[in-house]
Amino acid sequence: MGSPGSGKTTIAKKLALSELATIIETGELLRKESIRETQSGKKIKHYLESGDLVPTNYVVKVIDRAIAQTDGDIIIFDGFPRKSDQIEPFFKLKEKNDFLLQAVIGLKLSSTVAKKRLTGRRVCSQCGAVYNSYYNPPDKSGTCDNCNSELRHRPDDSSEHVEKRLRIYNEQTMPVFEYFKKHDPIKTFSVSAEKPKEEVFESVLQVLQKVGFDCVSNRNLPKGEGYGKQ
Ligand code: AMP
């Protein structure tokens, strides 16, 4: 879990790579669903573009489908559950699939940094590489360094939508984190996401070691991309 711009997906992807885990990237699954010309696709698109949370029934459907396609034994839920009415469906899916909940991690970020990260974010339309016009600009503005494709600004990363998404996070997602902190304090951790992603990742690894992932290592990362302890 984490505020918009806290790096949930970036950290989850690094973790998935180093742990051979499957990541269920809720926002991305919903974006994929939204470009389908179905009735639910059109509805989801409307919520995504306005910066609102998508109603829980649509979210649970895509998550359920994604779980059915996993074959690894570790799943990282990126951005689910994200509001209180998703807690019960989360536990139902946990029961249905016989999961063990190992850790709940909340990435914390000030709204000033979140705004800069989000409004400056640019994503490659082809390879998905992520840039930031303030912190990590591409060599040529608007073009991906890796594949020369066009960089896109997500519609929900515009400044007015960012304000709204941060407000929604404080009002709707924070209570979910508080729920886990209260009901499962031993497995629920807060990690500061203010620092560079390598340091945030290191803190997340330390949390996972606390809950018994002593195998966390760089073993599966390509040379030069290791962030964990050697
Ligand atoms: P993200 O990529 O995590 O920033 O999510 C992008 C957008 O997807 C959010 O602003 C929401 O509109 C939607 N979304 C992602 N996860 C959820 C969720 N668990 N429940 C409802 N909407 C979600």
Image (cartoon, helix red, strand yellow):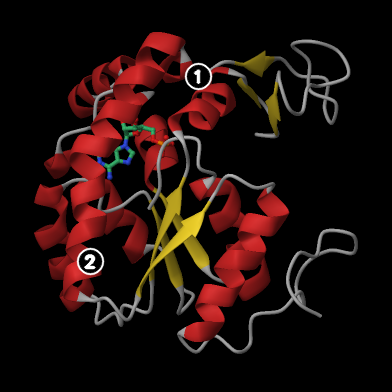
Q: Identify the residue shown where x is 16% and y is 69%.
A: 91
Q: Identify the residue shown where x is 37% and y is 10%.
A: 160
Image quarter of residue 132: top right
Q: Is residue 18 above or below residue 124?
A: below
Ligand 1 quadrant assignment: top left
Q: Identify the residue shown where x is 57% and y is 23%.
A: 116
Residue where numbered disc 1 is placed:
154
Q: Where is residue 177 drawn, in percent x and y?
A: 26, 57
Q: Is mark 1 within 8 Å of ligand 1?
A: yes
Residue where numbered disc 2 is placed:
180
Q: Secondary structure at mark 1?
A: loop
Q: Secondary structure at mark 2?
A: helix
Amino acid tagged 2:
Phe
In this view of the protein, which residue sits in the foreground, 184 or 213?
A: 184
Q: Identify the residue shown where x is 72% and y is 55%.
A: 198
Could you tell me how far apart the alpha carbons at marks 1 and 2 are, in whole angstroms?
A: 30 Å
Q: Horizontally, is 144 left or right of 177 in the view? A: right
In this view of the protein, which residue sits in the foreground, 24 or 215?
A: 215
Q: Is residue 26 above or below residue 219?
A: above
